[in-house]
Amino acid sequence: MGNIFRTNRLDHKSPLAGPTKTLCDTVTDQPSPIFSPAFARGTQSAGPEPSPSDPARAERPQQFHTMFRRASCLLARSLFLSSSRSWVRPFSTDLPAAPTADSTFVEAWKKVVPNIEPPKTPIAFVKPRPPTPSSIPSKLTVNFVLPYASELSTKEVDMVIIPATTGQMGVLPGHVATIAELKPGVLSVHEGNEVTKYFISSGFAFIHANSYADVVAIEAVPIDQIDPTLVQKGLAEFTQKLSSASTDLEKAEAQIGVDMHSALNSALTG
């Protein structure tokens, strides 16, 4: 594949190219019967199967070899052309915000019930996406939600520390756009000298280029609302279940309980 790239580059108007031909030109100059219209219509497959000593049968491996060489050449050329283009995919925050009204639903509603205002769909409650600022703001805007509640909504803070699966990750204003999977641990929200800590079970964190951070967790509770006695009791129970588990399902369930209560214990003692 590397030779194909080098040959293609030398084929352009370069003093090193000379009169040599590229691999693509070599394959193109040798058209194979496998690409002929007769082969496409299936006429070559008609009739009895040629004998092993038939020259037509002996030529088939060469035809397929030429076909694969041609396909490899075309793939290499497309990869070379795509890599030479200076194209950068924009961030989601750089794209225009979607309209806040479902025009299709509104038009359909007015045709059926023209005298009643159409109800609002969920998209009507979605606020337009804030643009990416030209300079780094002084605050980080955080949204922290659970399936049943919203803990923080557009809260401006100085920093958040999230328990990512790759380790503790601090997020400041101007952080690069990132998506991080969360593990059981402590989510710290720093606002001046005040630090609020939550224990989360799992989830995802979405860090946007416009200094917005969305943290979505399955379960979360403030650290000061956790009972250390119940944590120690649960850790002992799941440790006992893990040692006495006989099936893979029992072992997996017990291991999840041990990991969760170990993280809770570390959050209280750390």
Image (cartoon, helix red, strand yellow):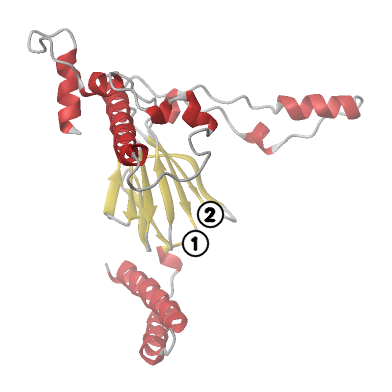
Which residue is rendered at x = 90% and y = 24% of the image?
114
Sequence-wise first label, 2 or 1: 2
Quadrant where the N terminus lies? top left
Looking at the image, residue 214 lies above or below residue 8: below
Question: Measuring 40% from the left and 64% from the top, which residue is drawn there?
Answer: 223
Q: Is residue 38 left or right of residue 71?
A: right
| Quadrant of residue 200 within the rendered picture | bottom left
Residue shown at the point (39%, 47%) measured from the top left: 51
Residue 94 location in percent, x, y? 43, 23
Figure check: 105 above or below 260? above
Q: Amino acid at mark 1?
A: Glu
- The image quadrant of residue 192 is top left
Q: Residue furthest left?
A: 16
Viewer-proximal residue among 146 and 89? 89
Tag of residue 53: none
- Identify the residue position indicated by label 1 in the image: 219
| In contact (CB < 8 Å): disc 2 and disc 1 | yes
Q: Residues within 10 Å of mark 2 (few under 14, many from 20)?
A: some
On screen, 118 above or below 220?
Answer: above
In this picture, residue 147 sits left or right of residue 191 = right
Residue at 37% across, 31% down: 209
Which picture quadrant has residue 115? Answer: top right
Q: Which numbered dot is residue 146?
A: 2
Instruction: Determine if residue 117 is in view.
Output: no
Q: Is 173 in front, or is 35?
A: 35
- Residue 11 rendering spot, x and y as whole percentages: 18, 14
Q: Amino acid at mark 2?
A: Leu
**Horizontal and vertical percent position of residue 247:** 44, 86
- In what element is the residue under mark 1? loop
Q: Residues within 10 Å of mark 1 (few under 14, many from 20)?
A: some
